[in-house]
Amino acid sequence: PFLQHALDSQLESLALGQVVPALLDRGFFYVDHFLGDIAGHMVLGQVKRMHYCGLLNDGQLARRSNGVCRSIRGDQITWVNGTERGSEAVNFLLTLIDKLISLCEGQLGKSIRARSKAMVACYPGNGAGYVKHVDNPNADGRCVTCIYYLNKNWNAKEHGGLLRIFPEGKSYVADIEPLFDRLLLFWSDRRNPHEVQPSYATRYAITVWYFD
Ligand SMILES: O=C(O)CNC(=O)c1n[nH]c2ccccc2c1=O
Ligand SMILES: [Fe+2]
């Protein structure tokens, strides 16, 4: 109970002290060392096993940016709810993110009542990325996107794969490296168009969407 209490109060100060102010002011927020090394590596191990077992089905067809229509496979994804065997660490991650969001909820000026399953995504490192888009352009109910990154020793100069957010109405863009044990949250609607730049190393992420 003591540890649980300490963990809860740490999450609470993260939620109220950092997540809420950033979401209300800039519309996005990220924190490093969210789970810590041990739990983070357990999640990475389970995601790698899903990949090696062929669970990440072939991603969408993407065209090269130079317009040549030689199609390359983009992100490879699978959906987990965390109760599957071999996704216990993913489930632990999801329970922490759920707690973090529920601690923010009252201050975000909206009720958050549900969450999607977790989308485990892998960009295979063949130069594929994800074109600029809005996750929820047409009010499908998704209000917050949460992405947990799993990439050790990621170096954007060499591996690309930056997440670039173009916050609506702002004069700057936000380049976010998909670093191991980094948790990113942002409003899913038109306030945050974003893209995944071409990735030249295997790039893992777990995404959940919260519904209002
Ligand atoms: O990985 C990132 O940093 C950002 N990733 C995205 O924005 C993103 N957004 N929407 C998707 C829908 C289906 C499959 C993959 C995706 C996807 O990676
Ligand atoms: Fe997206």
Image: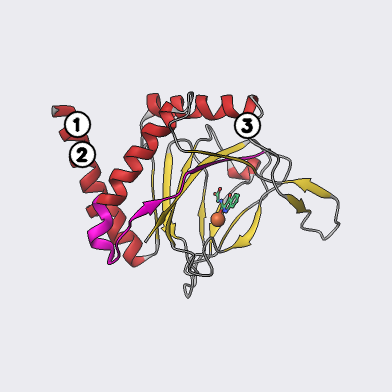
- On screen, residue 160 versus residue 143, left or right, reads right
Q: Is residue 138 magenta?
A: no
Of badges 3 and 2, nearer the viewer stands 3
Q: Secondary structure at mark 3?
A: loop
Q: Residues within 10 Å of mark 1 (few under 14, many from 20)?
A: few
Query: Does label 3 or label 2 sit earlier along the sequence?
Result: 2
Discs 3, 1 touching: Cβ within 8 Å: no
- Residue 89 drawn above or below residue 120: above
Q: Which mark is residue 57?
A: none
Amino acid type, label 2: Asp
Q: Quadrant of the N terminus?
A: top left
- Residue 33 drawn above or below residue 195: above
Residue 76 locus on image (x, y percent) = 65, 41
Q: Secondary structure at mark 1?
A: helix
Query: Does label 3 or label 1 sit earlier along the sequence?
Result: 1
Q: Which residue is mark 1?
A: 4
Which residue is drawn at the image coordinates 35% and 61% (left, top)?
23
Amino acid type, label 1: Gln
Q: Which residue is mark 3?
A: 55
Residue 37 locus on image (x, y percent) = 39, 27
Q: CA distance from mark 3 to mark 2?
A: 33 Å
Amino acid type, label 3: Leu
Could you say which quadrant of the image residue 57 lies in?
top right
Q: Is residue 114 magenta?
A: yes
Magenta region, residue range:
103-123
Q: Quadrant of the C terminus?
A: bottom left
- On screen, residue 157 versus residue 44, left or right, reads right
Discs 1, 2 touching: Cβ within 8 Å: yes
Camera-nearest residue between 145 and 172: 145
